[in-house]
């Protein structure tokens, strides 16, 4: 017999899953990897469905009373709300985790995520409800952020801890694959409806279908993740405190320095993340008159290239080390920032070069950006610390990137977007250097 997963906090759902799946055989890293990829792809699909709609739909649906650029800036303001809510969601759902079990936390978080995303499909326009429609979308966007903050399940840590010692870089890369895969599916759906529907039908009802799909994907992801939460490996790591949730504010108080460094370490890749996905779509549509479906196709191809670059980052990281990959990629992003954004104003060929080169760099950097300093946490606080770092990194590095980039580019020109990206690369290099010196002085002491 195997003990309950979370002691007295184990739920009926968790115990049923455990009886179904917690056999005597050891769960292979490959099985964990599949669950992690499914879970992360579902989260990023929800993310990109909203991101694409924030460019193609919400400016005209909710802000018809201002010009197109201002409407898009307002839409990006709503976009940022989820990132502000993520740390709050992390704190709330860590409490649920500690008191009611991880299965309960995941179930609530993923249903909140899927429900908030699906409910956006019913948002009426400003002409029907006025400012109430804007407030409704803001509340649902906050719900998405709270859910994403609470959806941290420790599975990337479980994958890392079960990975072969000489393949840690490869297995650290696997959870990141969810980002380009989610983009491919989301962009593909929008491109399909754009090409098969008239503009009027798309803006009336076609854009709503991807939001319905999000709920179904989240249900599938929930069961894939609960299956792994029910494994003996997960239970053992929970009981040994490797995956046990520590109090949120206690973790922040005791490990604030590690949290700060971890939040800034992936800044180059997180800033680039939105500068090759959300921002260029808005810039091209607002300034060139090109069709959205054409640019979405470029994004889909870029995301495929990103997958290949991520796979390469895992191989290279196992040879030279994750820190070296992060540092070198930050340097390359800094060089890219000096010329690449201007390519968005150089016609179709320039846009394609900007996107494909950006996705290559994103794959290399983002592939190794997860948990760069998590080893500095004590085992008792690693689970909560890793979740806190992830949410703060997204807030600082990516939450306001589309808004800031579009505002800068509109006011000062595309060169200013490069300066913004350069600041992220500098922050990454500084955080890596400080963390290395801190680790050296700690070991010496």
Image (spheres, rainbow, N blue to C red):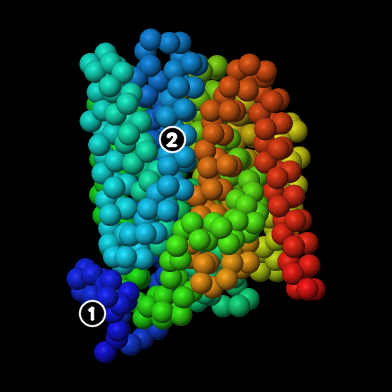
Q: Quadrant of the C terminus?
A: bottom right
Residue 402: % across, % down: 54, 31
The residue drawn where x is 56% and y is 58% is 253
Instruction: For residue 351, say whether it is visible.
Output: yes
The circle on residue 19 is 1
Residue at position x 35%, y 31% in the image: 138
Q: Residues within 10 Å of mark 1 (few under 14, many from 20)?
A: few
Image vertical order of residue 404 relative to residue 42, above or below:
above
Q: Residue 17: name its quadrant.
A: bottom left
- Report if residue 294 is visible in the image: no
Vertical side of 232 occupied by 158: above or below:
above
Label 2: element kind: helix
- Location of mark 2 (residue): 81
Dot 1 or dot 2, earlier in sequence:
1
- On the rendered structure, is 38 left or right of 125? right
Q: Position of residue 95 (x, y in %)?
A: 37, 59
Q: Position of residue 421 (x, y in %)?
A: 67, 36
Badge 1 element: helix
Q: How many marks?
A: 2
Where's residue 293, x and y in %?
43, 29
Relative to 213, is 284 above or below? above
* Marks 1, 2: nearer the viewer: 2
């Amino acid at each position: 017999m195997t003990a309950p997963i979370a002691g007295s906090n184990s739920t009926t759902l968790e115990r049923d899953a455990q009886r179904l799946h917690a056999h005597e055989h050891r769960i292979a890293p490959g099985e964990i990897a599949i669950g992690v990829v499914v879970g992360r792809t579902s989260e990023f699909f929800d993310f990109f469905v909203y991101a694409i709609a924030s460019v193609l739909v919400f400016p005209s649906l909710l802000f018809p009373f201002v010009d197109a650029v201002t409407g898009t800036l307002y839409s990006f303001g709503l976009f940022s709300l989820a990132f502000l809510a993520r740390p709050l969601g992390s704190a709330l759902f860590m409490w649920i985790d500690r008191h009611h079990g991880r299965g309960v936390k995941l179930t609530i978080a993923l249903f909140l995520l899927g429900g908030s995303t699906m409910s956006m499909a019913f948002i009426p326009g400003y002409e029907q409800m006025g400012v109430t429609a804007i407030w409704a979308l803001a509340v649902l966007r906050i719900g998405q952020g709270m859910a994403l903050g609470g959806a941290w399940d420790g599975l990337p840590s479980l994958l890392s801890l079960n990975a072969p010692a000489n393949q840690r870089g490869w297995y650290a890369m696997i959870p990141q694959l969810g980002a380009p895969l989610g983009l491919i599916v989301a962009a593909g759906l929008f491109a399909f409806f754009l090409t098969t529907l008239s503009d009027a039908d798309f803006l009336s009802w076609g854009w709503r279908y991807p939001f319905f799909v999000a709920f179904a994907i989240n249900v599938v992801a929930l069961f894939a993740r609960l299956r792994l939460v029910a494994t003996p490996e997960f239970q053992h790591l929970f009981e040994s405190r490797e995956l046990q949730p520590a109090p949120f504010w206690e973790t922040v108080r005791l490990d604030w320095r590690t949290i700060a460094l971890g939040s800034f370490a992936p800044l180059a890749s997180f800033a680039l993340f939105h500068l090759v996905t959300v921002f260029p779509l808005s810039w091209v549509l607002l300034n060139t008159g090109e069709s959205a479906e054409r640019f979405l196709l470029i994004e889909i191809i870029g995301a495929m290239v990103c997958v290949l670059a991520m796979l390469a980052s895992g191989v290279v990281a196992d040879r030279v080390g994750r820190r070296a990959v992060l540092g070198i990629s930050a340097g390359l992003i800094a060089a890219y920032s000096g010329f690449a954004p201007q390519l968005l104003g150089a016609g179709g060929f320039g846009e394609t070069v900007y996107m494909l080169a950006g996705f290559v760099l994103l794959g290399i950097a983002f592939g190794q950006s997860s948990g760069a300093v998590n080893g500095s946490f004590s085992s008792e606080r690693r689970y909560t610390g890793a979740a806190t770092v992830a949410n703060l990194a997204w807030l600082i590095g990516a939450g306001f990137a589309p808004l800031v980039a579009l505002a800068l580019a509109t006011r000062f020109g595309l060169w200013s977007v490069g300066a913004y990206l350069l600041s992220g690369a500098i922050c990454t290099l500084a955080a890596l250097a400080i963390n290395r010196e801190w680790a050296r002085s700690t070991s010496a002491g």
